[in-house]
Amino acid sequence: MSLTLEQVSKVESGKTYIYSTDFTLEAGSLNVLLGPTLSGKTSLMRLMAGLDVPTSGRVLWKGQDVTGKPVQERNIAMVYQQFINYPAMSVYDNIASPLKIRGLKRAEIDKRVQEAADLLKLTPMLQRKPLELSGGQQQRCALARALVKDADLVLLDEPLANLDYKLREELREELPRIFTASGAVFVYATTEPTEALLLGGNTASLWEGRITQFAPTLAVYRHPNTMTTARVFSDPPMNFLRLTKQGNQLKFDTGVSTPAMGVLADLPDAAYSLGFRPNHLTLERTSADALSFQVTVAVVEISGSESFVHVKHGEQRWVALVGGIHEPAPNTVFTVYVDPKHLYVFAADGSLVSTSALAKAA
Amino acid sequence: MAEIYLKKLAHSYLPNPQKPEDYALKEIDQVWEDGKAYALLGSSGCGKSTLLNIISGLLTPSQGQVLFDGKDVTHLPTEQRQIAQVFQFPVVYDTMTVYDNLAFPLRNRKQDEATIKARVTEIAGMLELSADLKKKARGLTADAKQKISLGRGLVRQDVAAILFDEPLTVIDPHLKWLLRMQLKELHQRLNRTMIYVTHDQTEALTFADQVVVMYDGYVVQIGTPQELFERPEHTFVGYFIGSPGMNLLPVKLDGSIAHIDGTSIPLNTDYQPKSGAKLELGIRPEFTQLSPTASANSLPVTIKRIEDIGRHKIARAEYQGKEINVVVPEDQSVSKDYKYLTLDPNNIHVYADGWRLKQEAAA
């Protein structure tokens, strides 16, 4: 059982929302669509659901062409950012509603509602009205209704975005377990890299209407295939630095040169961009062959256990995420380090060049 | 610019409040210093918006006073309080240029165009909006519009305080970083009293000098991010700050020994709790460590799951039916064979009925 998009695209009034996309999702899988606002997450979901008909290409369900088959004739559940429940019905009746429409027996309905309520910790609230519940409980009610349907495809469009931070954290922890138990194809849209990492499963990174990479979530995080994917999948943002390699020398945009070591020594002469995550930009030298850079402090943010030290390196803005409290004053000049094993090397066209060192880091 | 004194302030939405539960905001008596950045942090319904609305003048408190630099403003309407406000959704005039949007609060106050120009140019520069000044606001992205809103809040020099109500909620994560950083830089340059309301701990902690944590109408702790992390005064602060939050385990105390379901853990200090109080041991996931071998005072645990979230892993361990979260740094290994948990004694806290027990002087 799987959902396949074959060269699916969506163009409306001359604007391309989704460029030709090939994409297969397996049953029982959790698939995160990760990308900023307007990158195409919702457009892609609407095409999967049959709410929109693709401009070109086919949508297949278990090998059967379902392109153009309306959503009502397919077994699909959707959960949106806004909590959608029937305000006049009790939580119980809200969850039971798709089953009643399908004409299931009362005992069967009761069994499924109780199961879903138990899974989503709604049992004590079954007799209440949705508006008497907290935001988190209302969204759990909507989730329960989606789950109870036993849908083949469950689409969740930023379902936690309107919830308080802590509730989000708790639901994120619960959701993967709920998904595994269900067996449907789950698609989950989010703008937040951290959310993708907490959910696990597979991640498709989206940028301007294109899927830039689709693989198990940690693989995309650790081996982003392009600078674009790396940008989409970083929070805090990845740091970048342009350089030119000439012989055994690396020439940085700032005019500084340094001998090419390790993974960098093996690269052919060309222009590159180096990428490194904030947690790998360190205030102390961590290895003998670490690259070092002189930077100026812009601002420091402290999260309690960690410090985000924002620095300027020439025209580049970088951030170092370091453990503990470090609070250098603005405009202080000091040296930061990157261990070469944590470097991503991107070619001038943005594609990832060096992965050999990354295997070690992963 | 002003110091804000919240004098014996409390608020109830009921006409005749009797019990503490009747108050959306329980009594506080606090001075917020001139030029500092404060964050009001808590979940929905904790009273943070009530407090913000009292400071801004949208709401008259049922008890107490609000003083700006000693002047009682409790009954003054918002427009007479000299405050600027930035809301969750950008408030901009779509048909005006960015320049005119930023100039609006100053023109409203009849400042001369030369002063306005200098001020608008400065603020636009700080917010990296200089290139957009001649553009109409209509065509701009959501984050650019929110920058204009921020700029409008910052452009006036006569404000007592700038209030931010969840200003970054609708902004994408990677732009949030940029805006938050610019806001922090602006605060450092302008030294305005800023009050920032949010339910997002990262925003609160990274923005504020002092974070005011609210829970159920109470201010449970005011402190620097470091204090909230290292010494949560209430179990709610332990839970709310940190991802995952603090681990809490029921405990029995015997002087400086903690007994947790059959394991004894020596503490750094003697505690003398009131008898009958509900006692809990609190330790943050960052201060626990898993090992494949037992050591003195380690807790035997079962690992339920290990979640690799890139920067670090979170191990969900279980001890006597209680879940304990453990943060494992990126460069350390962990597996289900790691069955022993040690707690860093320097970072253990003991709570009685939710409040942190102070250490007894060494007897």
Image: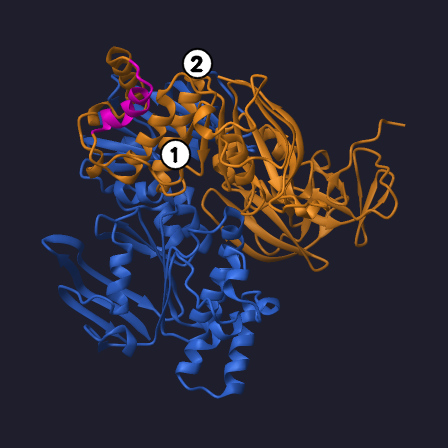
Chain colours: A blue, B orange
Horizontal placement of B249 versus A252: left or right? right
Q: Are marks 1 and 2 in contact (CB under 8 Å)?
A: no
Where disc 2 sits, the SS reads loop
Q: Which residues fall within the magenta stretch?
A: B97-111
- Residue in the foreground of this view, choosing between A149 and A82: A82
- Image coordinates of residue A142 in percent, x first then y, are 45, 65
Q: Is residue A53 in view? A: yes
Q: Is residue A226 left or right of residue B354?
A: left
- Tell me if mark 2 has few (under 14), some (14-19) or many (20+) residues whose alpha carbon lies within 10 angstroms of its own: few
Horizontal and vertical percent for residue A352? 26, 42
At 17% from the left edge and 69% from the top edge, which residue is drawn?
A58
CA–CA distance between discs 1 and 2?
Answer: 21 Å
Asked whether residue A246 appears in the rendered view, the answer is: no
In the picture, residue A309 is in which quadrant?
top left
> Is B145 drawn above or below residue A254 in the view shown?
below
Residue A21, given in percent of the width and then of the height, sits at 20, 59
- Residue extending farthest to the right is B363
Q: Main secondary structure of the magenta part?
A: helix
Q: List the residue tagged with mark 1.
A: B177
Residue under the point 43% across and 60% down: A83
- The residue wearing badge 2 is A332
Q: Dot 1: within a 10 Å radius of its alpha carbon, few (fewer than 14), some, or many (20 or more) residues?
A: some
Q: Is residue A237 magenta?
A: no
- Image mark 2: chain: A
Q: Which amino acid does the dot numbered 2 rest on?
A: Thr
